[in-house]
Image (spheres, rainbow, N blue to C red):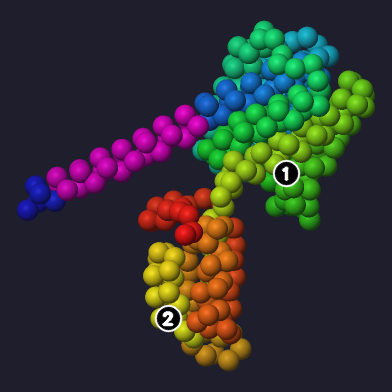
């Protein structure tokens, strides 16, 4: 019996180790691919047209212009203090993933640097360079890393000030893009602002996905009918949570369900058909791990 228990324990440990190895392989493969894509956007579109990204990448591009030194050198040097801050304030895994992402980007920037630029039109460069760069950066962020030390500063300041992460990042990047206007001219600064906007939106698309999923919570007295209808008409599993009214203390049942964007209206229709007084909240879900959730079309 003891031998069998030991074998079962060893088997479970091997499964856990395999899952961890698979997780980290996928994580760093995504960072590797993201760095290649980001470098393509920078070196083939943005940098040759004096259009910059925000954050440390933007500062590194300007430093490269001023000194003639390699972009990769500045990407690594300027991010070192922020990596240290990230390690202390956010965590070891984030710092390691960010360091690896920066090193990959530095390497691929050197590889693609000699490649001729794709277009001489700065507007096209801002749009397409922004899309490609944003795709790469989005993959890196989704994998748990970063290329921008200013985000680390923003996260820390968010904890210690009244400003949000987005507000801090926006303030820093407005300063950086204004500096680009002094260096490259104000028309290139405006193109850089366009590129920054496109990059931000592309990062959102990569992180959230084109077809977002939504977590729905339904407070109702008709939980059995709604659960059955959601199972039958949407094919979605439902989790039943037990609650109580904060004012009346009356027992309430809360249904929790995850649906796609295409299914939201159908879900509302089902719920209101079964219980017109139901209280429904809907929130976007950026990622789903585990379970049997699958995206599908509404027929």
Reading the image, the residue beneath label 1 is 154
Instruction: Specify the label residue 81 is tagged with.
Output: none
User: Which secondary structure dominates the residues rendered in magenta?
Assistant: helix
Q: For the residue labelled by badge 2, is the local secondary structure a helix, a strand or a loop?
A: helix
Choose between 299 and 68: the one closer to the eye.
299
Residue 207 position within the rendered picture, expressed as x and y whole percent measured from the top left: 59, 44
Q: Is residue 10 above or below residue 219?
A: above
Residue at (53% x, 30% y) in the render: 31
Earlier sequence position, callout 1 versus callout 2: 1
State the residue at coordinates (57%, 22%): 36
> Is residue 60 shown to the viewer in this render?
no
Mark 1–mark 2 Cα distance, whole angstroms, equals 47 Å
Q: Is residue 252 above or below residue 216?
A: below
Q: Residues within 10 Å of mark 2 (few under 14, many from 20)?
A: some
Q: Residue at x 27, y 42 (%)?
A: 15
Q: Is residue 82 above or below residue 78?
A: below
- Few, some or many C-alpha atoms within 10 Å of disc 1 (few <14, some 14-19, many ≥20)? many
Number of the label disc, if any, that sits on residue 225: 2
Taking 103 as reference, is 12 left or right? left
Please say whether residue 8 is one of the residues in the magenta stretch: yes
Q: Is residue 248 magenta?
A: no
**Which residues fall within the magenta stretch?**
6-30
Q: Quadrant of residue 291?
A: bottom left
Q: Is residue 75 above or below residue 157?
A: above
């Amino acid at each position: 019996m003891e031998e069998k228990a030991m074998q079962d324990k060893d088997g479970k440990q091997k499964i856990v180790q395999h899952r961890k190895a698979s997780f980290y392989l996928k994580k760093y493969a995504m960072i590797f691919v993201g760095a290649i894509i980001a470098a393509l956007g920078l070196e083939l579109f943005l940098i040759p047209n004096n259009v910059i990204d925000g954050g440390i990448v933007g500062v590194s591009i300007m430093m490269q212009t001023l000194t003639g030194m390699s972009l990769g050198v500045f990407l690594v040097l300027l991010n070192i203090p922020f990596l240290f801050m990230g390690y202390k304030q956010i965590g070891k895994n984030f710092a390691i993933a960010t360091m690896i992402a920066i090193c990959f980007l530095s390497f691929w920037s050197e590889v693609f640097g000699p490649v001729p630029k794709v277009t001489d039109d700065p507007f096209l460069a801002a749009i397409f360079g922004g899309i490609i760069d944003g795709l790469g950066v989005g993959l890196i962020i989704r994998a748990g890393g970063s290329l921008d030390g200013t985000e680390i500063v923003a996260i820390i300041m968010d904890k210690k000030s009244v400003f949000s992460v987005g507000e801090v990042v926006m303030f820093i990047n407005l300063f950086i893009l204004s500096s680009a206007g002094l260096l490259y001219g104000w028309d290139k600064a405006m193109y850089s602002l366009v590129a920054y906007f496109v990059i931000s939106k592309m990062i959102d698309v990569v992180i959230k996905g084109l077809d977002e999923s939504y977590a729905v919570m339904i407070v109702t007295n008709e939980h059995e009918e709604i659960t059955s209808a959601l199972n039958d008409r949407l094919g979605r599993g439902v989790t039943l949570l037990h609650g109580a009214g904060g004012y009346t203390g009356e027992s309430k049942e809360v249904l929790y369900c995850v649906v796609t964007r295409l299914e939201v209206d159908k879900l509302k229709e089902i719920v209101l058909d079964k219980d017109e007084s139901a209280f429904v909240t809907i929130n976007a879900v950026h990622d789903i791990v585990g379970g049997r959730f699958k995206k599908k079309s509404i027929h």
